[in-house]
Image: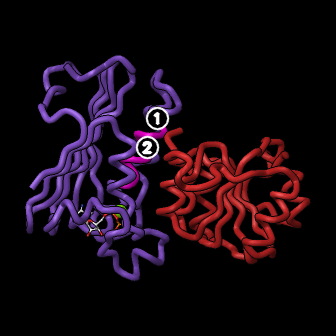
Amino acid sequence: MTLREIKELLDAEVLVGHDQLDKEIKTAFGADLMSDVLAFAKAGSLLLTGLTNPQVIRTSDVLDIAAIIMVRGKRPSPETLRLAEELLIPVLTTKYILFETAGKLYAKGIVGCMERVDDERAFT
Amino acid sequence: MAAWKGLTTNVLSHEPAIYENSFPVEGGTYENAGHVSSQIKALLKGMKISKEVVRRAALVTYESEINICSYARSGKIVLQVTPEHVTIEAIDEGQGIVDIELAMQEGYSTATDRIREMGFGAGMGLCNIKNFSDFFRITSEIGKGTHLKMVIRIDKDFDGI
Ligand SMILES: Nc1ncnc2c1ncn2[C@@H]1O[C@H](COP(=O)(O)OP(=O)(O)O)[C@@H](O)[C@H]1O
Ligand SMILES: [Mg+2]
């Protein structure tokens, strides 16, 4: 799915990355704990989160996250948005809750970046 | 106290570094937390290093940087790149770690509410660092500070000898 299709599906607003909507997304990870994102999220995945502080952007940069969807209508601070612009990481916001956001994506074929935590430790 | 992963000898000190730089990290604040990691990641991206190695190096740097911001007064991150490996050292001045074995345990954390608000403090940082490095060493002195050394292989055949 492209980021543009995801935006339509989630009735989301693009806050950063209007020029990156053609990006192809296949996997996702959802968490409100950056520690978990760091441990489990894989490169190229979509990040679903309710956190909005600048560390979300830093974490995404470190992990090569393809784009961030802020759920539950969360809107980041200008500082967070500035950092996302600087690091070229798309940020979208949707009014759907995390569960609904994940469900809608899953129904369209987006899968978790790992199925269970005992699969293997995310090394790539 | 010290804990080790990989080789216990300081095998890497004799190689000529092709790149070395030190980056200061401010302790006790999240104002610039992650800034050094982004910088180091961008630097490594500009060198002919595989994406996977860059990502692992960025990740261990970031976890170390967040720990300095969270638990130390001040610190620095030293990056060294040779054709065989990327070495990252995180050296801080601060409270140090009383029980390293405990701190290394998944889930153990002394993080404050302030740290948790940022989404950190799940007690997985040091385990992550260990899992993502090929060589890992941690030493700490109570009341003085903590020193982490992480090595990530570029050359898969490099065995450190
Ligand atoms: N640089 C450091 N200086 C002092 N204590 C530290 C440092 N790094 C880690 N610690 C201690 O080790 C614990 C575990 O660290 P870590 O695995 O990164 O998890 P977390 O940061 O989520 O608590 C911390 O809660 C803290 O008590
Ligand atoms: Mg930590």
Tell me whether the residue at label 1 lies in contact with that at label 2, contact meaning CB atoms closer than 8 angstroms.
Answer: yes
Q: Which chain gets the purple colouring?
A: B
Judge left or right: residue A101 versus residue B159.
right
Q: Quadrant of residue B111?
A: bottom left
* Rendering coords of residue A46 (x, y %): 69, 53
Could you tell me the amino acid type at mark 2? Answer: Ala
Q: Residues within 10 Å of mark 2 (few under 14, many from 20)?
A: many
Residue at which label 1 appears = B54
The residue sitting at 40% across, 70% down in the picture is B121
Q: Quadrant of residue B71?
A: bottom left
Could you tell me the amino acid type at mark 1? Answer: Val
The residue sitting at 65% across, 63% down in the picture is A30
* Rendering coords of residue B20 (x, y %): 27, 31
Give the magenta-colored segment's residue range. B55-63
Residue B4 vs B1, above or below: the answer is: above
Q: In front: B81, or B107? A: B107
**Residue A12 covered by magenta stretch:** no
Q: Which chain gets the red colouring?
A: A
Q: Are marks 1 and 2 on the same chain?
A: yes
In this view, the residue farthest toward the bottom is: B113
Residue A3 vs B78, above or below: the answer is: below
